[in-house]
Image (tube, helix red, strand yellow):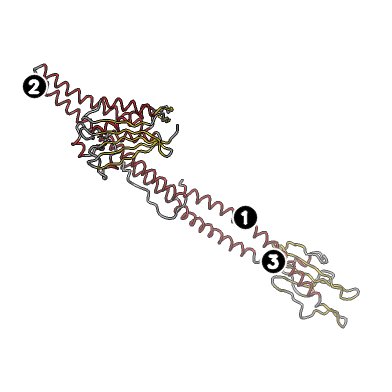
């Protein structure tokens, strides 16, 4: 059973119950009012008729104004012995009913219940007559069955109308749920995450729910897209060394006979093997960082000492005759994961060497500024064009020009990794660069220590 039907059913049952209660209440009230009115009319007519009986010239005289029938009420005069003097009874049995002064009572006669009211009229000293009024009870409630009929027709009609209206309203309000289901089903069938729930109407709860779902689909689509790119880029990157390795193997197997040539081939294969190992290693740490699957132990470390030691290491493997100078404010402490911070700085310095000018300069500075810790790596190399700057943080992104300019360009993962590490530590990273003049990468951390 659909929710729409359930709501309509509940609504209808409620309406039926409500109508029954209202109906019973109306019936009760009309019955008592009708009864009350009927008694009033009966006694009123009898009372007024008693004034129409006189005794004149030794004879009992009944005035012309005596009303023997009015609005369903019969009125007749009975002698002391029970004989009818004037008027008529609707049923003979009513003539025989014992006389009872001044009280309305019910009497059954000829399959009908009558309200009967008697009044004694003392005409003269030893002559008395009775005025009797009789009104059928069904007649008294003359309007009640008509009212019931009207109610019995109107109420089901109203219930039907309400149920129909309820069904429509329920249908309209549940529309977004149908849409959500439809879209989810379409996505499941086609695998197309770009589909969205169509949202019409005003912003009720279901409308907001549909909005939430749409935002969730946005997020899922973006994640899925990123994942797809990542996989295709990673496979693409791995394909190049694998192709080179296979080509080298084929060449060596077919052509190489000299030991030296064989060494050369193995050397080339080894180089590609290292490249792959490096790529896989970087991808793994990247994924771990991004998905935060690893728990890192953040400890207060001496950042000044760490920066000094990384600079010393990098200087040793320095190339192109580039001079590395470090300006480090001593004793700067920070809560961080030491190995990750070292890795971040290594990546920045390696880039500075890679994209630096022959016999150029690299300056690493560490200091405190405005409540923040500022670590920067500046070079005077090729620099980065403004248009490229937003893109260099993306995975596998490499600037074309610098790729050809710099020997042994990397995988395009270095800066993406740097950014991940900085964000993990709640810091920010920015770059200022001028093509042909050099670049400055600046990392800012909160001054926790
Ligand atoms: P790669 O492994 O290619 O160095 P990165 O993610 O480290 O990848 O850097 C992305 C791109 O940013 C590089 O291809 C390069 O063009 C540019 N880049 C990074 N650092 C520098 C720098 N110090 N000077 C000039 N360009 C840089």
Q: CA distance from mark 2 to mark 1?
A: 103 Å
Q: Which residue is mark 2?
A: 255
How many tags in the picture?
Answer: 3
Q: Position of residue 83 (x, y in %)?
A: 81, 71
The foreground one among 148 and 110 is 148
User: Which of the labelled discs sits on residue 406, or is there none?
Assistant: none
Q: Which residue is mark 1?
A: 21
User: Ligand 1 lies in which image quarter?
Assistant: top left
- Mark pair 1, 3: CA separation: 24 Å
- The residue under label 3 is 140
State left or right for residue 240 relative to residue 119.
left
Mark in front: 2 vs 1: 2
Q: Earlier in the sequence, mark 2 or mark 1?
A: 1
133 relative to 337, above or below: below
Disc 3 CB within 8 Å of nearest ligand 1 atom: no
Q: Nearer the viewer, mark 1 or mark 3?
A: 1
Label 1 close to label 3 by CB (< 8 Å): no
Q: CA distance from mark 2 to mark 3?
A: 126 Å
User: Which residue sits furthest bottom?
Assistant: 57
Of residues 361 and 384, the one drawn nearer to the viewer in this rendering:
361
Please indicate whether residue 367 sits to the left or right of residue 315 in the image.
Answer: right
Q: Which secondary structure, mark 3? A: helix
Query: In the image, residue 52 lies at what x, y percent?
Result: 80, 78
Of the image marks 1 and 3, the number of the one nearer the N terminus: 1
Quarter assignment of residue 55: bottom right
Residue 283 image offset from top left, x and y in percent: 30, 30
Q: Dot 3: few (<14), some (14–19), or many (≥20) neighbours within 10 Å? A: many
In this picture, residue 66 sits left or right of residue 357: right
Asked whether, in this view, residue 160 is left or right of residue 144, the answer is left
Using the image, determine if residue 137 lies above or below residue 313: below
Residue placed most toward the observer, 267 or 334: 334
Q: Residue at x 46, y 45 (%)?
A: 1
């Amino acid at each position: 059973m659909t929710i729409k039907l359930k709501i309509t059913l509940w609504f209808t049952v409620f309406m039926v119950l409500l109508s029954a209660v209202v109906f019973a209440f109306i019936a009760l009230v009309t019955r008592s009012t009708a009864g009350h009115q009927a008694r009033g009319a009966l006694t009123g007519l009898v009372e007024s008729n008693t004034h129409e009986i006189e005794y004149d010239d030794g004879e009992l005289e009944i005035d012309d104004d005596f009303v023997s029938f009015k609005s369903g009420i019969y009125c007749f005069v009975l002698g002391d012995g029970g004989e009818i003097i004037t008027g008529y009874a609707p049923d003979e049995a009513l003539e025989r009913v014992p006389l009872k002064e001044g009280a309305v009572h019910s009497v059954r006669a000829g399959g009908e219940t009558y309200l009967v009211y008697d009044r004694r009229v003392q005409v003269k000293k030893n002559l008395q007559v009775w005025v009797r009024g009789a009104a059928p009870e069904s007649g008294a409630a003359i309007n009640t069955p008509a009212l019931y009929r009207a109610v019995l027709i109107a109420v089901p009609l109203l219930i039907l109308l309400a149920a129909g209206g309820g069904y429509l309203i329920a249908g309209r309000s549940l529309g977004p749920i149908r849409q959500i289901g439809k879209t989810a089903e379409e996505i499941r069938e086609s695998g197309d995450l770009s589909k969205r729930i169509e949202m019409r109407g005003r912003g009720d709860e279901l409308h907001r729910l549909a909005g939430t779902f749409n935002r969730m689909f946005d997020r899922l689509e973006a994640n899925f897209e990123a994942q797809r790119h990542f996989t295709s880029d990673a496979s693409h990157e791995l394909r190049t060394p694998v192709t080179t390795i296979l080509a080298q193997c084929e060449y060596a197997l077919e052509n190489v006979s000299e030991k030296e040539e064989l060494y050369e081939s193995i050397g080339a294969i080894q180089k590609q093997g290292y490249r792959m190992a490096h790529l896989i290693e970087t991808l793994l740490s990247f994924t771990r960082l991004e998905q935060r699957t690893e728990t890192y132990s953040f400890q207060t470390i001496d950042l000044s000492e760490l920066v000094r030691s990384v600079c010393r290491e990098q200087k040793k493997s320095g190339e192109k005759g580039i001079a590395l100078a470090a300006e480090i404010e001593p004793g700067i402490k920070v809560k961080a994961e030491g190995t990750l911070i070292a890795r971040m700085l290594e990546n920045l310095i390696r880039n500075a060497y890679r994209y630096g000018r022959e016999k150029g300069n690299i300056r690493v500075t560490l200091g405190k500024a405005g409540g923040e810790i500022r670590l920067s790596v500046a070079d005077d190399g090729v620099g980065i064009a403004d248009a490229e700057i937003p893109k260099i943080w993306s995975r596998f992104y490499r600037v074309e020009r610098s790729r050809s300019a710099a020997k042994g360009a990397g995988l395009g993962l270095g800066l993406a990794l740097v950014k991940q590490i900085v964000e993990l530590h709640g810091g920010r990273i920015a770059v200022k660069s001028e093509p042909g003049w050099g670049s400055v990468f600046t990392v800012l951390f909160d001054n926790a220590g």
